Image (cartoon, rainbow, N blue to C red):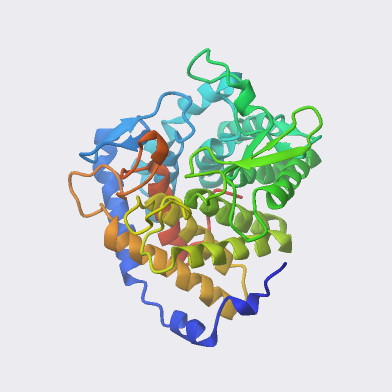
Amino acid sequence: MRIEPSTYFSTVEAAAAARRDTRSHQEALERCIAKLRQTMPVIGLRNPKIGLPDNSWVYCGPYDWVVSFQAGQLWLALQLTGDSAFLNAARARRAVFRGILAHQNAQNHDLGFQFSLSCVAEWLMTGDGEAHEMALAAARQLVCRYRPDGRYIQAWNARHVHSQRMQAEFANGRIIADTMQNLALLYWAHGETGRADFREAADAHAQTTLDHIVRPDDTSFHTFVFDIASGRPLRGETHQGYADESCWSRGQAWLIHGFAQSALTTGNPAYADAARRLAAKAEALMEGDAVPAWDFGAPDQRGTHRDSSAAAIMAAGVYLLADQSEPEEAARWRSLGDRLLAGLLAHCDLTRDPQALGLLAHGASHVRAGYADTMLPYGDYYFMEALMRSLGHDRFFWS
């Protein structure tokens, strides 16, 4: 059932949000820029994958899904400063993305993350023709993953990119919450070319996600499985969450941002409504927490791992939703974004630590696999995006 926007905010909250003090956000954003400048000689052309206990990085292999998040931060820094050092460091990574386009087995639904924050960003910032063509090539590969019988974009490949290991039984017919953020590349490509199939595949996948990943109570599955022959919906599952029926917080955050971005791009009110319902549910599930638990259904919520990346993605998403809302509702979502940023600044901020190579501590990459309480490059990227959105910046690389 659709929840009316009036249930999301009160005039008291709106008045409080109108008195927002964002000085801490501006100061934090300036520290992010300084940290990027400081770490460029250390990181070089490498791309962070996950943090180590000493707050240094493990770096990506050539086809990793997170390979673009350092580039995305550098493009944001260029936008804010005009400093050619950021331009050169971001542009010098282009060979990584050429490599992805040259190897079909390296291409999956994460082409949206990889190319929106690299080649689309470069095209929007500089007008570079090769970057434009590479981004369109990636969109053509992404749309080929569309399965018309089930009206979805398949997430993963039958053969693992870094080995000869087959995973067809697991991968075939599977969608995941994260893909909502990757649709931005298809919507961008539709705008650039007018090719209807880009928009049609993105819209169909968004509706399928809304029908099957988003539950009636506005929580979400991480993944959903379809019969590969008929497209018939089978079951919701998790891959990185606590349990199939729990609610993995980063998946909920991807959906909030992804639906809010799709609403901005298409004007479809169903997408905005989905984003607002998912955001309201996430806020309720957080209760009094400053930073969300890695999974809202995990036991012992008081002592469980936190996920700073979920908080950062969610904050960026609710600010994006606020920008599309009427004033009182917008105040409601900015208040939630401010709360999430306050939690990150109080408990996860590494920008004052001269030894840290990243921006945020306490990310939860894959808790059940043992990857928790660490820096994450996607958390860092969305932290910068959320800070910028909180301050009124509205030029990003998702459209």
Camera sees residue 94: yes
- Name the residue at 44% across, 33% down: 67
Q: Nearer the viewer, residue 380 or 310?
A: 310
Vertical comparison of 346 with 329: above or below: above
Q: Quadrant for residue 279, please give it.
A: bottom right
Quadrant position of the N terminus in the picture: bottom right
Q: Nearer the viewer, residue 289 or 114?
A: 289
Q: Quadrant for residue 383, please give it.
A: bottom left
Is residue 197 toward the left or the right of residue 239 in the image? right
- Name the residue at 63% across, 80% down: 6
Vertical comparison of 314 with 52: above or below: below
Query: How many numbered circles are shown?
Result: 0
Q: Quadrant for residue 80, please give it.
A: bottom left
Residue 300, percent from left and from top: 37, 55
Residue 146, percent from left and from top: 73, 34
User: Which residue is situated farthest in the left direction here?
Assistant: 354
- Name the residue at 73% across, 46% down: 208
Camera sees residue 396: no
Residue 386, percent from left and from top: 44, 59
Q: Nearer the viewer, residue 288 or 11?
A: 288
Residue 270, percent from left and from top: 72, 61
User: Which residue is situated farthest in the front direction here?
Assistant: 299
